[in-house]
Image (cartoon, helix red, strand yellow):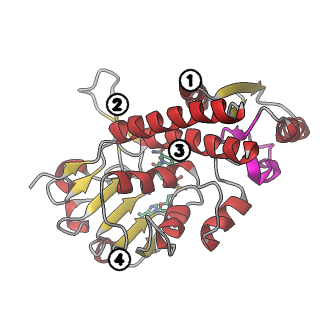
Amino acid sequence: MAAKIIDGNAIAAQIRKEIASDIEALKKSTGVTPGLAVVLVGENPASMSYVKSKNKAAHEIGIYSEQHNLPANVPEKDLLALVEKLNKDPRIHGILVQLPLPDHIDEKKILNTIVPEKDVDGFHPVSLGRIMTGEKGFRPCTPFGIQKLLVYSGVKIAGSHVVVVGRSNIVGKPIANMLVQKEADADATVTICHSRTKDLPSITRQGDILIAAIGRPEFVTADMVKEGAVVIDVGINRIEDKTHPKGQRMVGDVKFDEVSKKAAAITPVPGGVGPMTITMLLYNTLQSARAAGA
Ligand SMILES: NC(=O)c1ccc[n+]([C@@H]2O[C@H](COP(=O)([O-])OP(=O)(O)OC[C@H]3O[C@@H](n4cnc5c(N)ncnc54)[C@H](OP(=O)(O)O)[C@@H]3O)[C@@H](O)[C@H]2O)c1
């Protein structure tokens, strides 16, 4: 039977509606308007497009947003000074430094300078540590979006075996730590796989929920998936396709055509995890403003 499609666009739209009405209520009750500062270094076209989308989404939902563009050769100390200034700015509740940064800048140093109270991207070690210990804090936007996709689609997480392929600090490790927590919307048994995992298909086939965050086009094939599994495809890959007007098209880490015949539910690419990432950035900014206004 064909899998149910988990529609990231529809779920993101629903969550954005909820965020917009919560922002309205926050403004009325406390006078606080959530504020987001987005910092862009250089002119990487992909980064420019992400930053533009984030600012637009923030503006549309009622968040005050400002963009700081710095040249690619900006000295590290100037970027640190900007982050310090934003840390102290009472209008700003969330600071996002778009990655990747140029080679002469120490990415970790910059991310670690953002105060954890404004770390709406959830990349600060304090935020990541709080995920591990199950404390309140900002969840990184992509893993948070995956968790919301599962919850809003009615997928049972508690007691399920979640297999995550990929152990990056921005997707694999945080989603695994979030879903293993002893709390609502979690309580799963979690296995993390990576490039050194032996006999990967024998492990992925055990997943009631399979999360692919690998960065390899159509890597997960039907023989790697359990019949009736829920498959979340995080991958964003561009492959050559002469039949496509642009000569290329976007695919995920999962071979959608064959896996969608075996899975119970699956996210498409595009239109699955992607739309959730910015949505959870907006959500985190609202939470930060709430905490500041409380
Ligand atoms: N939708 C969104 O908003 C969103 C957000 C973030 C990322 N993404 C996409 O998600 C994908 C993953 O991103 P990422 O930043 O997590 O990537 P990453 O940092 O490159 O990590 C990839 C992970 O996959 C593992 N891996 C690579 N080849 C493998 C193989 N043959 N077998 C098993 N595991 C393998 C790597 O293992 P090792 O650790 O052993 O190298 C690594 O842990 C990318 O396509 C990215 O574009 C999408």
Element at badge 4?
A: loop
Q: Residue 293, image x and y in percent?
A: 74, 42
Provide the residue designation for mark 4. Answer: 159
Front in this rendered view, residue 15 or 263: 15
Q: Which residue is drawn at 66% across and 38% down?
A: 98
Q: Distance between the residues labelled 2 and 4?
A: 40 Å
Please state which amino acid type lies under the numbered disc 2: Gln
Q: Residue 248 carries which label?
A: 2
Compare marks 2 and 3 and give the one earlier in the sequence: 2
Q: Residue 201, image x and y in percent?
A: 30, 72
Compare marks 3 and 1 and give the one earlier in the sequence: 1
Q: Residue 56 carries which label?
A: 1
Q: Do the residues labelled 3 and 1 touch (CB within 8 Å)?
A: no
Look at the numbered disc 1 and say if its residue's Cβ is closer than 8 Å to ligand 1: no
Compare marks 4 and 1 and give the one earlier in the sequence: 1
Compare marks 2 and 4 and give the one earlier in the sequence: 4
Q: How far apart are marks 2 and 3 (CA)?
A: 29 Å
**In this image, 266 relative to 133: left or right?**
left
Q: Distance between the residues labelled 3 and 4?
A: 25 Å
* Residue 113 drawn in magenta: yes
**In this image, 17 relative to 64: left or right?**
left
Of badges 1 and 2, the one in the foreground is 1
Please state which amino acid type lies under the numbered disc 3: Met
* Residue 29 drawn in magenta: no
Q: Which residue range is magenta in the image?
A: 92-118
Q: How crowded is mark 1: few (under 14 residues within 10 Å), some or many (20 or more)?
A: few
Of badges 2 and 3, the one in the foreground is 3
Task: Locate residue 27: give its quadrant.
Answer: top right
In the rendered image, which quarter contains the N terminus? bottom left
Q: Which mark is residue 280?
A: 3
Q: Residues within 10 Å of mark 2 (few under 14, many from 20)?
A: some
Q: Which residue lies furthest to the left in this view?
A: 1
